[in-house]
């Protein structure tokens, strides 16, 4: 399952990051760049995730996705996450001819 997170500006000028449609943000930041970096770090830890970064006027600036290759690999292997799926994915990638 993919998680979607947003980076948006608040009326007080601070930037916030959190789950899409959540009432309370995960964190507040002074700059958009700081908020984007923090939200992307969180998203990477959550697995198959998407981060939408919105500008000061509410326009979508960037749409970043994390963990998709791992999620596709787990489906191809035939099931959900396995404790060793990260190791298998890394091994398969390193054994590929260049």
Image (cartoon, rainbow, N blue to C red):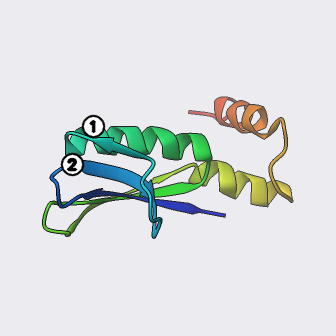
Q: Residues within 10 Å of mark 1 (few under 14, many from 20)?
A: some
Vertical position of residue 63 compared to residue 13: above or below:
below
The residue drawn where x is 76% and y is 31% is 87
Locate residue 59, reporting x and y percent.
19, 69
Marks 2 and 1: which is nearer the front? 2
Give the class, few, some or many, for how many residues have Cα within 10 Å of label 2's Cα (few <14, many ≥20). Answer: some
Q: Residue at x 58, y 40 (%)?
A: 45
User: What is the secondary structure assignment of the residue under circle 1?
Assistant: helix
The image shows a total of numbered marks equal to 2
Q: Where does the image place residue 36, in percent across and percent down from the top left?
A: 32, 45
Please report the residue visible at 53 percent of the width from the left and 42 percent of the height from the top. 44
Q: Quadrant of residue 77?
A: bottom right
Pick whichever, 88 or 33, lies toward us.
33
> Secondary structure beneath disc 2?
loop
Q: CA distance from mark 2 to mark 1?
A: 11 Å
Residue at the disc numbered 2: 14
Please tell me which residue is depicted at 60% across the width and 46% down the height of the picture: 46
Q: Position of residue 34 (x, y in %)?
A: 27, 37
Q: Quadrant of the N terminus?
A: bottom right
Q: Earlier in the sequence, mark 2 or mark 1?
A: 2
Task: Identify which residue, 89 or 54, lies in the foreground.
Answer: 54
Rendering quarter of residue 91 = top right
Q: Which residue is mark 1?
A: 34
Q: Position of residue 10 (x, y in %)?
A: 23, 58
């Amino acid at each position: 399952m993919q998680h979607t997170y947003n980076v948006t500006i608040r009326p007080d000028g601070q930037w916030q990051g959190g789950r899409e449609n959540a009432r309370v943000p995960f964190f507040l930041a002074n700059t958009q760049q700081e908020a984007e970096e923090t939200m992307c770090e969180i998203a990477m830890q959550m697995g198959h995730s998407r981060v939408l970064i919105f500008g000061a006027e509410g326009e979508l600036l960037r749409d970043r996705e994390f963990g998709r290759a791992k999620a596709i690999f787990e489906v191809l292997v035939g099931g959900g996450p396995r404790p060793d799926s990260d190791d298998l994915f890394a091994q398969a990638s390193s054994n590929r001819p260049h």
